[in-house]
Image (spheres, rainbow, N blue to C red):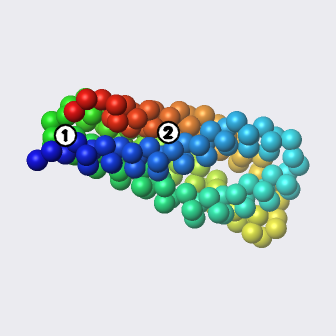
Amino acid sequence: MDLELPIRIAALATVLGTGVVYGTDVFCAMVMRPALARVDDSALVAVIGQVHRYGDRRMPVPGVLGIVAAVVCLVAAAVAANWAQAVAAGIAVAALLTWLLLYTRMSAPINRRLTEAAMAGTVLPNGRALQAKWDSIIDLRAVLQAVAVAASCAILILPA
């Protein structure tokens, strides 16, 4: 059975799903972080809390698509003995699972606290410190997403 087309479709789905998250993380690192550093604490909590309110509800769709597609690509490439593609897919899966671990352990709890404060209209006394902790891993998150996108793009150009 020729699995080349399903491998490439899964790689493309990985690029598209992961690309959404990658672009968001890069935007946060390059634009949101410096912009939020220039606003007062109440604006920071209100704005970023609302961003997380919507982001945490909507971003899992492309994120899960990217992870599932990367796993499908890995399995299909391994079954087809397309080892270069399987290695690239394995790199993408490892990067995405590492990103997910960082997100669930560090970012998501901060997101919830900032969202709750924004919804309640309160200013957290440690809101800026929470944001600084969140910001401390955004570059790493963006790099992990970049690795996953690049590895998935490699699958698309590697010979079968």
**What is the three-letter code of the residue carrying label 2?**
Gln
Q: Residue at 82%, 65% (x, y): give it.
A: 122
Q: Position of residue 10 (x, y in %)?
A: 33, 48
Earlier sequence position, callout 2 versus callout 1? 1
Are the residues flagged by discs 2 and 1 in contact, CB closer than 8 Å? no
Residue 46 position (above or below residue 20): below
**Residue 57 sits in which quadrant?**
bottom right
Say few, some or many: other residues with alpha carbon within 10 Å of mark 1 (under 14 / 14 to 19 / 20 or more): some
Q: Tag 2, which secondary structure? A: helix
Tell which residue pokes out farthest to the left in this image. 1
Say few, some or many: other residues with alpha carbon within 10 Å of mark 2 (under 14 / 14 to 19 / 20 or more): many
Q: Residue at 70%, 66% (x, y): give it.
A: 116
Q: Position of residue 160 (x, y in %)?
A: 22, 33
**What is the three-letter code of the residue carrying label 1?**
Ala
**Residue that badge 1 annotates:** 78
> Which is nearer the eye, 111 or 2?
2
Q: Position of residue 9 (x, y in %)?
A: 33, 48
**Residue that badge 2 annotates:** 145
Q: Position of residue 37 (x, y in %)?
A: 81, 40
> Which is nearer the eye, 143 or 11?
11
